[in-house]
Amino acid sequence: MAAISVRDLVKDFRGELSLRRRRALDGASFELGRGEVFGLLGPNGAGKSTTFKCLIGLVTPDRGRVEILGDPPGPQANRRLGFLPEQPMFYEYLSARELLDWVGRLHGLDRVERERRARELLERVGLQGAEDQRLRGYSKGMLQRVGLAQALIGRPEILILDEPMSGLDPLGRHFVRDLILELRRAGTTVLFSSHVLSDAEQLCDRVAILIRGRVRREGTMRELAPQGGRGYELSLAGPEAQRRAAELGPVVQVAAGEVQIHAADEAAVARALARALELGLAVRAIAPRRRSLEEAFLDEIRRAQQEEGAET
Amino acid sequence: MNPARIAAIAQLTFRQALRERVLYLLIGAGSLFIVASLAISLLTVGDEVKIIMDLGLASVALTGSLVALLVGAGSVALEVERRTLLVLFSKPVTRGEVVLGKFSGVLALALTNVASLALLLEAVVWWRTGAADPRLLIAIGLSAVEVVLLTAFAVLFSCFSSQMVSGIFGLGTYLIGHFADGLELLQAKVEGGAALLVRILTLVLPNLERFNVRAEVVHRLPLPDAQLALSVGYGLAYSGFILLLTILLFRRRSFA
């Protein structure tokens, strides 16, 4: 059984004061296996948050089907699920400890278990010492940590994180990345959305690219950003290399005292390398040129725009 | 429906409502009015205690109703506006538990307010006459039933509109509800389609005047038990219906 199954999801919203409907989801489909870390990527307005709201039962789709560990969205499924909304807002007059205690009550934990879980999680997210401070005085990073703690209190089998890195400093992002990796090791299924594609590259087993409410691509990093077929890059260092790089092949990039040369195949690599050694240039690295996830992502957006242009 | 989860939501709602400034303004105004009734009663000859009771009971009923309507108006709407609902709904709670939790929390606060002002009123009457009047409790009890009904309406409106719109709808319901006797009079004077419309309004809208027995209590007029039981039953049944309607409609609501 899949951890999460989303099939042909369609959702239209009507504006507050207008009768015109806006399609937020247009047949979105994807599936997560148990223990998988899955990234839902997409530009603003792609429908990522709406998909998550369908998963937690906050939004009822107009068409399509959602299953979480075989259950439809709702209280039963939410027992086994933890959710961190984008830019989470909490009851600001509560302390972190009080919030976790309250969430624990909603999960049906007894007092002893609630206290134990709260202590454990506050330590895990690095909030010990601030647990009795009102949430109104918390920084954005601290709120994100409380958000993670409240999502984890019911020992969820599935964790859904909506833009968990958004607005965090490098330390905060590092913390969230480590936590996701730790949860993966423990067998938790993690579904998260992110604008930061390098995070998805580092963390995800698979990703789906969602554009205008439809999944345009889905697969592993290798499938979406294949290594082969894109040639190689030679990295050369020093001012002499920068001056004579063009003699070796097309220059891809010049930065920080290094220059990158593109070689289309192994034969081109051998020729460029021989010429570099002949000229006495310092060769730093030779690596296959990889299509980055960012390139795959931008390609999909361009393709979607072209298709839309052709339709209109 | 899980009573523990309803209690958890109710407690948080109660605590949240304690932070509303309007609550303290209303309690302050209600208390001041009860105390001021002592001075106002001096302006009359012979009926001082009746004036104190009448003004005091009106103050208890009005303050309790306004607390229910204004605090209840924000009970769900503020969760939506402040986006705290995202956290609440991602937990294993049903929409029905949220509605009943919110209703219980607001009701507990409004009834605490009614009980506090009722105590103050009894204290003022005792200070003025040397004895508390147990008949006041009948009028206060019916005011409490009115508060139950108005809380149910406030939560209904709050589930589907902003705090301000809910407040306006709530106050509208309060005014129309106290004008219901007037609607019945109007029904007798109009004909045709207009009569039918008034008839429907009379049936659908709550008649809050059923809970007003201040004149009977103050002037020591008879109050049949059957009439009291009918009023209490009407209030509780109407509240139950509104809550059920709220749960059914709220279950269908999507949050963009």
Image (cartoon, grey):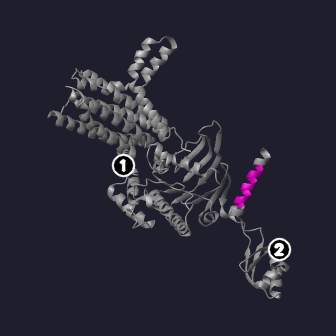
Q: Residue A176 bears which disc, if any?
A: none
Give the residue pinned by disc 2: A250
Marks 1 and 2 belong to one chain: no
Amino acid type, label 1 = Arg
Amino acid type, label 2 = Pro
Chain letter, disc 1 residue: B
Q: Can you give x and y, in whole percent of width and height, for residue A20 in the image?
A: 65, 37
Q: Can you give x and y, in whole percent of width and height, for residue B75 in the image?
A: 43, 43
x 51%, y 14%: residue: B193
Give the residue pinned by disc 1: B15
Quarter of the view holding residue B58? top left
Crowding at dot 2, Cα within 10 Å, few <14 / some 14-19 / many 20+, comes out as some
Q: Can you see residue B206? A: no
In the foreground, B224 or A66: B224
Helix, strand or loop status at disc 2:
loop
Q: Which is more foreground, mark 1 or mark 2?
A: 1
Q: Can you give x and y, in whole percent of width and height, for residue A163 in the image?
A: 57, 58
Residue A285 lies in the magenta-colored region: no
* Disc 1 from disc 2: Cα separation: 68 Å
Tell me if residue A150 comes above or below residue B169 in the rendering: below
In the foreground, A38 or A297: A297
Residue A303 lies in the magenta-colored region: yes
- Predominant SS along the magenta part: helix
Magenta region: which residues? A296-307
